[in-house]
């Protein structure tokens, strides 16, 4: 049960120790204290360990995560869990911009709100936000699922390729080529599983589904300037 | 890049610590702007006394020279390359005239009943030390660490910019239409001391307030006029305000407690504040004006 106090140790030392862990390590639960908004905490982990961070973190926390379960008991700055590959990242507070950006896999759970561009260019990650998300979220989303229990800001899913956007509250506006879709049995099953894994006790039927209208897939002369 | 900090105190007992709190916040933002740093502090002041912050060489004799020339006692507080002149309200124009006639080597960078403004090239830690920011008291203040993008690394190009009495503005970002906005403002009679885009933004807010806008309204108007990336923090005699561009290109985070409101480009800058663990932390929304005032 290693405990790393970032008031004493440097983030580089922490990350180096985490990167050196073999996949069968016995040091399976790490605690990080006094993050004080520092950047790049617990990025690039490639081992099935648990990391608990006690406090607010800065940019890019838990980025590129593979297999680790990272819990942040605080808020997060820009780019939380960006390019995550697998594993679970759970944030107790609010996330700043671009949470889960370009994520390839894994589950990102945000207990509070996420601000602008949540899930931008997501490529397979699942994101569950229990609060609301800001404008331009899921911009150019390619695949994966974004679940929002609260409201979504302007231009949701602008230029979306393929991804499922489940929103329970109001959607301020949809971006280009994003449209509402019927909530079929396959989508219900996916949503129910994600809500269950995120610990969100709300009915599946209270959500609406948005996705790609697929009108921007191919060049169309009317779209040219 | 650039880093911004702002601190607005709600409780009187924190006022002696304003400079030290603001200085700690500013120093954390060194990574975002090691070129130069600056800050504006709103001290106690007096309603019938006016203050000018001047920058340049040979400042020590100014008090004597001005007092003799005007027949009025002119106070002077010297801090490194800057000095704050203090004198009765009525002689403000005479002081300005005397300065431009006899001391063209000096730049007047701040004016008002309460504002004092300091900025220099160099690492924030050095700038903070040279002006002894930790020794300054006040009700609110803003600071800036600069990584230059739109104009050269010079003292004049450092922030904050002050274009009106007790007003100042710091900026993270870059404006793309500042040339045309400047031309319009010059037609309205405003003058600019630098080529900096931020000075134009400060001038725009000054102009709108001169035309009768409240601070909030002036900032809302800038949403329609200024094109580019920006997070602004604006200081006035009684308060401060925050505005981010409509796509919130530049980061910003705020903290509020019963004792203060604080702004930081990054949370790291707020982490040094007392009681931050219990503060309400939030991210200001794009295109929304946030303002706090002492009444």
Image (spheres, coloured by chain):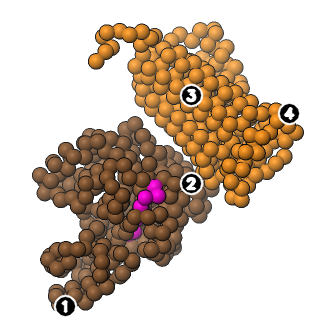
Q: Of the numbered discs in the image, which one, if any, rests on residue A102?
A: 3
Q: Which residues are magenta?
A: B33-42
Can residue A88 be seen at all in this image of the molecule?
yes
**Apparent colour of chain A:** orange
Mark 1 lies on a secondary structure that is helix
Are discs 3 and 1 located on one and the same chain?
Answer: no
Gap in angstroms between the C-alphas marked 1 and 2 = 49 Å
Instruction: Provide the chain ID for the residue under circle 4.
Output: A
Q: Is residue B29 magenta?
A: no
Determine whether label 2 and label 3 are within 8 Å by CB. no
Can residue B288 be seen at all in this image of the molecule?
no
Q: Position of residue A22 (x, y in %)?
A: 82, 36
Gap in angstroms between the C-alphas marked 1 and 4 = 82 Å
Residue drawn at (67%, 14%) of the image? A189
Q: Position of residue A81 (x, y in %)?
A: 62, 35
Q: Which residue carries the number 4 mark?
A: A24
Viewport quadrant of the C terminus of chain A? top left
Q: Which residue carries the number 1 mark?
A: B68
**Horizontal relation, residue B196 to residue A56: left or right:** left
Q: Position of residue B69 (x, y in %)?
A: 16, 88
**Apparent colour of chain B:** brown
């Amino acid at each position: 049960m290693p405990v790393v106090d970032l008031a004493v140790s440097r983030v580089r030392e922490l990350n180096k120790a985490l990167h050196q862990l073999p996949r069968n390590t016995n040091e399976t639960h790490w605690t990080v204290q006094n993050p004080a908004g520092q950047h790049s905490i617990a990025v690039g982990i490639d081992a099935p360990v648990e990391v608990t961070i006690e406090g607010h973190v800065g940019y890019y926390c838990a980025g590129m995560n593979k297999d680790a379960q990272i819990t942040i008991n605080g808020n997060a700055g820009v780019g939380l869990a960006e390019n995550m590959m697998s594993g679970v990242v759970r944030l107790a507070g609010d996330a700043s911009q671009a949470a889960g950006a370009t994520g390839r896999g894994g589950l990102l759970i945000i207990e509070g709100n996420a601000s602008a561009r949540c899930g931008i260019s997501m490529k397979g990650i699942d994101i569950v936000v229990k609060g609301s998300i800001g404008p331009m979220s899921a911009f150019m989303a390619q695949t994966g699922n974004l679940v929002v229990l609260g409201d979504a800001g302007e231009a949701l899913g602008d230029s979306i390729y393929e991804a499922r956007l489940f929103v329970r509250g109001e959607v301020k506006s949809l971006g280009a080529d994003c449209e509402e879709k019927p909530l079929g049995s396959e989508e219900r099953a996916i949503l129910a599983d994600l809500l269950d894994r995120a610990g969100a006790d709300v009915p599946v039927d209270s959500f609406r589904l948005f996705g790609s209208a697929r009108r921007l897939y191919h060049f169309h002369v009317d779209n040219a300037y | 890049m650039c880093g911004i900090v702002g601190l607005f105190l709600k409780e009187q007992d924190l006022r002696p610590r304003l400079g030290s709190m603001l200085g700690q916040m500013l120093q954390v933002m060194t990574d975002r702007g090691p070129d130069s740093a600056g800050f504006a502090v709103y001290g106690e002041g007096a309603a019938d006394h006016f203050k000018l912050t001047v920058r340049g060489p040979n400042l020590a004799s100014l008090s004597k020279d001005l007092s003799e020339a005007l027949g009025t006692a002119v106070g002077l507080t010297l801090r490194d390359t800057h000095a704050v002149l203090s004198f009765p309200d009525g002689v403000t124009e005479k002081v300005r005239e005397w300065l431009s006639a006899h001391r063209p080597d000096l730049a007047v960078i701040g004016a008002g009943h309460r504002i004092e403004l300091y900025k220099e090239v160099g690492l924030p830690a050095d700038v903070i030390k040279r002006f002894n920011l930790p020794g300054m008291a006040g009700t609110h203040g803003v600071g800036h660490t600069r990584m230059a993008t739109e104009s050269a690394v010079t003292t004049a190009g450092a922030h904050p910019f002050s274009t009106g009495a007790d007003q100042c503005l710091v900026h993270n970002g870059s404006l793309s239409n500042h040339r045309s906005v400047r031309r319009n403002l010059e037609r309205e009679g405003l003058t600019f001391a630098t080529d900096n885009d931020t000075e134009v933004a400060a001038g725009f807010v000054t102009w709108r307030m001169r035309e009768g806008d409240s601070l909030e309204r002036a900032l809302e108007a800038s949403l329609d006029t200024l094109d580019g990336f920006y997070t602004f923090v604006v200081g006035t005699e009684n308060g401060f305000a925050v505005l981010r561009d409509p796509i919130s290109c530049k980061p910003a985070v705020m903290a509020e407690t019963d004792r203060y409101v604080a702004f930081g480009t990054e949370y790291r800058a707020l982490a040094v504040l007392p009681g931050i663990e219990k503060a309400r932390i939030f991210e200001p929304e794009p295109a929304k004006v946030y303002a706090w005032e002492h009444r």
